[in-house]
Amino acid sequence: MPTTELNQLSATELSRRIARREVSCVEVMQASLARIDALNPQFNAIVSRRDADACLADARERDAQLARGERMGWMHGFPLAVKDLSHAIGLPTSMGSPLAPKTPARTDSLHVARARAAGAVIIGKTNTPEFGLGSHTYNQVFGITRNAWDPSKTAGGSSGGAAVALALGMLPVADGSDMMGSLRNPAGFNNVIGMRPSRGRVPGSPDDDLFFQQLGIEGPMARTVEDTARLLCVQAGFDTRVPLSMTDPLPSADALDLDGDVRKGLRIGWLGSVWPDLPIEPGVRELCESALQTFRALGCEVEPCVLDVPREQNWTAWLRLRQLIVSGKLSALGADPAYRAHIKPEALWEMEQGKQLDAASLHQATVFRSNVYRAFVRLYERFDFLVAPTAQMFPFDAEMHWPPQVADVPSKTYHHWMEIVTPFTLAGVPALNLRAGFGPQGLPMGLQLAGPVNSDLAVLRLGHAYDKACKWSALQPPAVASQA
């Protein structure tokens, strides 16, 4: 099979062909490395690459295992690049910062270890913003990652490198993480799929804090919902070292079945802008509303709704809890004048804001967050699922650090333009980015499909039906089409 075709196979089909030995792991690796060599210089999605000969040697070992009748799992022979906020043995974890240690990691992050155990071959890292802050993937170490559909535009973030690598066929699947839409926003900006699972579905690696940090979470990205679901099955599962991880299991990736009729009459609440006064760039809401016809064609009932919690409570909870987490992790770096000069202003702002927090303000933030969750519970008494735009604006100029305004409304912070993703994070509900289509300038946009807590498989089943029915999944970025 030509390498260009191998790069565009779904991960599900690729896994089957590898298992049947219709295509070798070496051929898959060669195709992936060739695509990276061809397109990565322009788009900058993959960083800290391993030596190609070492990657091919690992692929040959995977083929030898199959020859012996030994298949490690669903990802057997898959090339995988790990988001550069997570650890992969033998590769540095730069986090996009010149202050990060240059020494190779000695252990894998938990979800990376699970992917490796399922047969993946680690080939490098995917680029991310400095410390993962901001939904625009650029940093002082590796530079800008550029949108797969228009390299003059942002890839989103913080899983921007992962989303672009998928869209361009460099990888069959990718891992990412999401605090402020980092699995959803770059997926929407690059016309791929990204899922923020329910809180605890994919346990984070054991860290200093095992209990308080409940905003950031690891999760899957892919070119199809089915592939996303199968990667989630690899990543998910309880770990005794992570006490807040979920105990209820998902099926194995090979046993997963998403096909079947969508139940007629499913009720979907269309959140639109979530709050009436949330600024959204012209064209985003209209495009997403047109995409709702796909749900109606599947037999779903769609009705407009709003999230019945004050927008200011949601934003206050978000700011304070994020500031506590970010400031707590980074303040030691910021305290050293020699280091401060190498930290981007947005990270320094988070540190300074965190210093002003007191117990009363944090308690109020947790109450406000609880109010956000209760508002979702009320909506889920009326609706089976909720849908909203993935972003408030289309991909912007890649040379810009962050958009100063949305629809003529000034952004008060570097991340204010991403406000639409925050209530889903605060509520801890599973949220899946689906393709909504392309705006007037030919740039992608996504839809967030969210269900109640722990309804991850139900969200994926409906998303899978939508993904098969919509016309956007077959489109390829211009750079990929020129490779064919």
Image (spheres, rainbow, N blue to C red):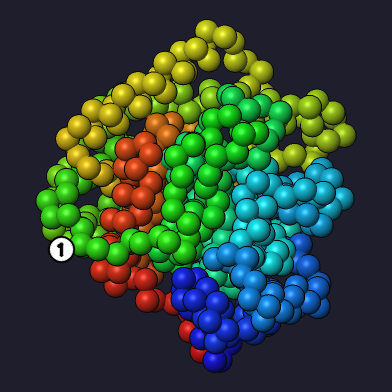
Question: Which residue lies most toward the bottom here?
Answer: 1
Residue 419 horizontal/vertical position (percent): 42, 38
Residue 109 horizontal/vertical position (percent): 69, 47
Residue at image position (68%, 78%) is 68
Count the marks.
1
Question: Which residue lies most toward the top here?
Answer: 360
Question: Which residue lies most toward the front here?
Answer: 69
Relative to residue 484, is residue 452 depicted above or below?
A: above
Q: Is residue 412 visible?
A: yes
- Of the residues shown, which amino acid type is indicated by label 1? Ala
Q: Quadrant of the N terminus?
A: bottom right
The one nearer the camera, 77 or 44, is 77
Residue at image position (33%, 50%) is 459
**In the displayed structure image, the side of residue 23 where residue 139 appears, left or right:** right
Residue 213 horizontal/vertical position (percent): 58, 29
Label 1: element kind = helix
Residue at image position (80%, 38%) is 341
The one nearer the camera, 13 or 155, is 13
Relative to residue 115, is residue 422 depicted above or below?
A: above
Relative to residue 204, is residue 260 depicted above or below?
A: below
Query: Which residue is label 1 attached to?
Result: 297
The one nearer the camera, 34 or 155, is 34
Q: Please identify the quarter of the rendering in which residue 77 is found.
A: bottom right
Q: Is residue 194 visible?
A: no
**In the displayed structure image, the side of residue 442 where residue 163 appears, left or right:** right
Residue 366 horizontal/vertical position (percent): 46, 18
Alpha-carbon neighbours of circle 1 within 10 Å: few (<14), some, or many (≥20)? few
